[in-house]
Amino acid sequence: MGLRVFSTATVVMVLIAPTSSLKAYEFGSPGTDQKPGVTLGGGSAGSPAPGIYMFEQVYTYQAMISGPGAPNGGQTPVRFESSSTGFLFVPGWTFLGANYDAVIVQPVSTLSVGSPINSGYFGLHNTYIVPIELSRKLGDSGFFVKTGFGFLPPDGMISGPAGLSNSGHPWWTLDPSLTVSYLKDGWNLTASFYYEMNTKNTVTGYQSGNILHGEFTGTKRIGQWTVGPVGYYYGQVTDDRSSAFYNYAINVNRYNVYAAGLLVGYDFGPVAVNVWALDDLHADTSGSTPLPGKATITKGYNVFASMSFRLWAPESGQSDTTPKHLLYK
């Protein structure tokens, strides 16, 4: 999950938050800790100029519960919304020829699920912390490679008999990442991959399988505008491990979701704004036990908006209202 949300003259945030309480895996819990698609706001493997950046991102996810176990004939609505505030620290350090940065993000999210489930919450999600990202420029080829490692401690709002009745999660999530970009002549062609690994729920003992994310950007900057297609894939690639709390039943063991959409951005100078929307084109799920075929997944559409600006520049020693030419992860 690293901060892979930079674009030319833009710092945007990575929102880390649950997607829906029915997406997959432990009963009453989402299958991902990072909302798929949040990194697509101009993301690349480049590194911004030294300084401290602040970023805000909001999004809404409107969906229906689908899959072989979907209630109400697949007509149960899910609405998830979130807002996050984050900071990117770029001290100007290098390590083995790569530029270093670090990130911290705090999301707040709200969820509502319609009839016949009728549930919801509002609260702080687990904080997203990235102590290290390293971006390397490959000569004058236009290619960049970035690697990172992030994690989410169980510090969100946690309640309920399984620890899953609010937006926080009672477990740790580890998130290594790899991003490759071509950044030249206004193009941002980026493929970003990250891998979520969860520890056991400290209340129930249930442990989700690992989740692979792939997010893809193909934008072009034209004057102050940026436009182009975006897309993502995410899926659970290892099995869940249940516990006595659920009599060793499993809600969802595997799933796959593919989405595609469009990004439009504008650089106002001191502040840059991106908006992007994606539709879930395909979603499938399987592997529930002891009732095979009863797994569920959500399928819908996403709309994201981000705003970013530079708080402080070391060359001036004070707040800098004019963004530099930035290459983002």
Image (cartoon, grey):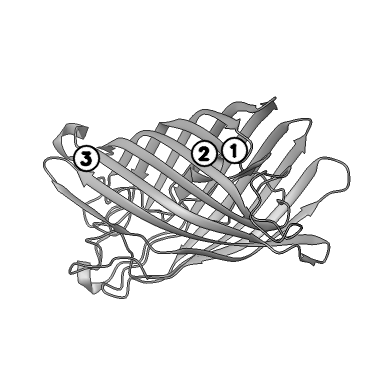
- Side of 220 where 162 appears, left or right: left
Residue tagged 1: 216
Q: Which residue is mark 2?
A: 232
Find residue 102 and report its horizontal and vertical position in percent. 62, 63
Q: Residues within 10 Å of mark 2 (few under 14, many from 20)?
A: many
Q: Residue at x 63, y 55 (%)?
A: 319
Q: Specify the quadrant of the image occupied by residue 225.
A: top right
- Residue at the spot 27% in from the left edge and 44% down from the top edge: 296
Compute the Cα span from label 1 to label 3. 29 Å
Distance from Cα at disc 2 to Cα at disc 1: 6 Å
Residue lying at the far left of the rendered structure? 116
Looking at the image, tell me whether mark 1 or mark 3 is earlier in sequence order. Answer: 3
Dot in front, 1 or 3? 1
What is the spatial separation of the Cα atoms under label 2 and label 3, in whole angstroms? 23 Å
Mark 2 vs 1: CB contact within 8 A: yes
Residue 255 placement (x, y as % from top left): 40, 46
Q: Is residue 242 above or below residue 15?
A: below
Q: In terms of depth relative to the viewer, which is nearer, 322 or 1?
A: 322
Q: Quadrant of the N terminus?
A: bottom right
Q: Earlier in the sequence, mark 2 or mark 1?
A: 1
Disc 3 element: loop
Kind of residue sitting beneath label 2: Tyr
Q: Is residue 4 visible?
A: no
Mark 3: amino acid: Ala
Crowding around mark 1 (Cα neighbors within 10 Å: few <14, some 14 to 19, many 20+) is: many
Numbered disc 1: secondary structure = strand
The residue that mark 3 highlights is 70
